[in-house]
């Protein structure tokens, strides 16, 4: 239901620009405020938590893995709630819970508490908050969905640029525990007012159409929105290929976010320098994001996905050679491009192949599979760092996985019957 406040905001933009771009801004801020549940923020906290609680990095990675796995199992339910209640209602609840989870995590006193905190942060932040934001943008755009998803993902780039150095500052100023309380309060302050005043679930709720197309004339019946339901999607080969892509990408990108500081400091670089590379990757993401979004709107989708997987493999290999600042800088740039592809795909792929009427339910299952990958990815690398002293050999082996998936996408990924592919993208 649209409130009078929201209706006035929509009316204020009428004739000036499409209100969908306001929705993109709100959802970009949503991706930014998911930062406390993202691996690039956890990366800064691994050392202080390990030292304070006397827990090994492998134990932290294992707690992270099992907690994230548990959180992933709830995402299909979250997707169904988004379909039934609308993304605005769900996002408001998630932001409140994410802020509370930050305070809970800051009070962790052992591995079990840490694991429960990880589960809450990953479920409310990295999983559900991102799902809700991607759902809302997908409802407002169709032909320009790739570009809109790319702009939304700039919020994640801002999080990469701001949350790690901000966390470092807070850890030095007030300790790692109070740092989490501060992050939770920041999440509430930034996101809750925007959701209340600006967010609208779909353009149809306020008499608009996706992409800013001309509203229907009075008395004209709107065209039915085409899309598969969850059961139909689960019968399509495309769903399982995309789920496998998301499993691989989710796991391998998480490895780099989670262990970037640990890996680079183990290769002779300072912790401060390793953390400072996150803003470099974020800047690269911002620069490349509009281009990546346009690629999804202009080029056959399976080819763009294959390119994204190739760049992911390149990032995994590049970090193993980052033993000097120039090489580390090169890695950070490649990693930024990887994130530009990943975040655009997150908001683009599911509505592209399955439509938007049941998007939450379908995306919830796909996101669950991706988060399962994210939960498992850090485990072998954490084991290698603790037992072998380096994760380089494991990272180089893992780089084979996205290359295999790239070939599978090019050969076998096609739009399901009943869904009309955008012109030139099949």
Image (cartoon, grey):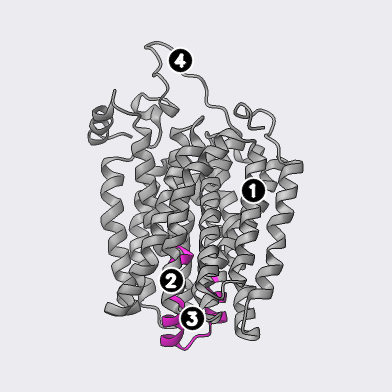
Q: Do the residues labelled 3 and 1 touch (CB within 8 Å)?
A: no
Q: Residue 267's mark?
A: none
**Which residue does the image show at 32% across and 28% down from the upper left?**
17
For label 4, count other residues whose C-alpha is less than 10 Å away and answer few (under 14), some (14-19) or many (20+). few
Q: Which of marks 3 and 2 is in front?
A: 2
Q: Is mark 2 on a helix, strand or loop?
A: helix
Q: Could you tell me what secondary structure mostly forms the magenta stretch?
A: helix
Residue with the mark numbered 1: 307
Q: Is mark 1 on a helix, strand or loop?
A: helix
Q: Can residue 10 be seen in this view?
A: yes
Q: Is residue 84 visible?
A: no
**Which residue does the image show at 46% across and 18% down from the upper left?**
222
Q: Which of marks 3 and 1 is in front?
A: 1
Q: Do the residues labelled 2 and 4 touch (CB within 8 Å)?
A: no
Residue with the mark numbered 2: 275
Task: Say which label, 4 or 3, has the lower sequence index.
Answer: 3
Task: Say which label, 1 or 2, has the lower sequence index.
Answer: 2
Q: Which of marks 2 and 4 is in front?
A: 2
Task: Say which label, 3 or 2, has the lower sequence index.
Answer: 3
Which residue is at the far top?
A: 219
Q: Residue 111's mark?
A: 3
Residue with the mark numbered 4: 221
- Residue 44 painted magenta: yes
Relative to 400, residue 366 above or below: above
Task: Specify the segment rendered in magenta.
Answer: 37-64
Task: Say which label, 3 or 1, has the lower sequence index.
Answer: 3
Judge by depth and name the residue closer to the eye, 310 or 183. Answer: 310
């Amino acid at each position: 239901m649209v409130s009078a406040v929201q209706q006035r905001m929509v009316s204020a933009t009428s004739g000036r620009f499409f209100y969908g771009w306001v929705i993109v801004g709100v959802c970009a801020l949503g991706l930014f405020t998911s930062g406390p549940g993202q691996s690039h923020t956890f990366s800064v906290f691994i050392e202080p938590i390990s030292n304070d609680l006397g827990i090994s990095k492998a134990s932290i990675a294992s707690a992270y893995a099992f907690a994230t796995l548990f959180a992933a199992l709830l995402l299909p339910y979250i997707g169904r709630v988004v379909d039934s209640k609308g993304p605005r209602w769900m996002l408001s609840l998630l932001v409140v819970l994410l802020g509370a989870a930050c305070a809970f995590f800051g009070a962790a006193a052992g591995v079990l508490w840490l694991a429960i905190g990880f589960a809450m942060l990953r479920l409310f932040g990295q999983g559900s908050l991102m799902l809700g934001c991607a759902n809302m943008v997908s409802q407002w755009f169709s032909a320009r969905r790739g570009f809109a998803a790319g702009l939304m993902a700039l919020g994640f780039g801002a999080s990469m640029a701001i949350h790690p150095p901000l966390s470092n500052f807070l850890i030095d100023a007030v300790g790692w525990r109070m740092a989490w309380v501060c992050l939770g309060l920041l999440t509430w302050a930034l996101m809750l007012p925007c959701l209340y005043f600006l967010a609208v679930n779909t353009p149809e709720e306020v008499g608009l159409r996706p992409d800013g197309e001309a509203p229907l004339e009075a008395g004209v019946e709107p065209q039915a929105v085409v899309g598969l339901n969850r059961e139909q999607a689960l019968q399509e080969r495309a769903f399982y290929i995309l789920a496998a892509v998301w499993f691989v990408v989710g796991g391998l990108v998480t490895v780099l976010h989670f262990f970037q500081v640990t890996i680079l400091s183990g290769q002779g670089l300072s912790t401060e320098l390793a953390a400072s590379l996150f803003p470099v990757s974020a800047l690269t993401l911002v620069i490349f994001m509009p281009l990546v979004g346009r690629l999804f709107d202009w080029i056959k989708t399976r080819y763009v996905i294959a390119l994204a997987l190739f760049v992911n493999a390149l990032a995994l290999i590049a970090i193993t050679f980052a033993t000097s600042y120039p090489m580390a800088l090169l890695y950070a740039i490649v990693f930024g491009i990887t994130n530009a592809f990943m975040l655009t795909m997150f908001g683009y792929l599911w509505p592209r192949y399955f439509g938007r009427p049941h998007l939450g339910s379908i995306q919830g299952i796909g996101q669950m599979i991706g988060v399962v990958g994210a939960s498992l990815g850090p485990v072998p690398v954490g084991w290698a760092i603790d037992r072998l002293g380096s994760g380089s050999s494991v990272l180089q082996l893992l780089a084979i996985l996205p290359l295999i998936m790239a070939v599978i996408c090019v050969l076998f990924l096609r739009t399901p019957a009943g869904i009309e592919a955008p012109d030139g993208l099949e």
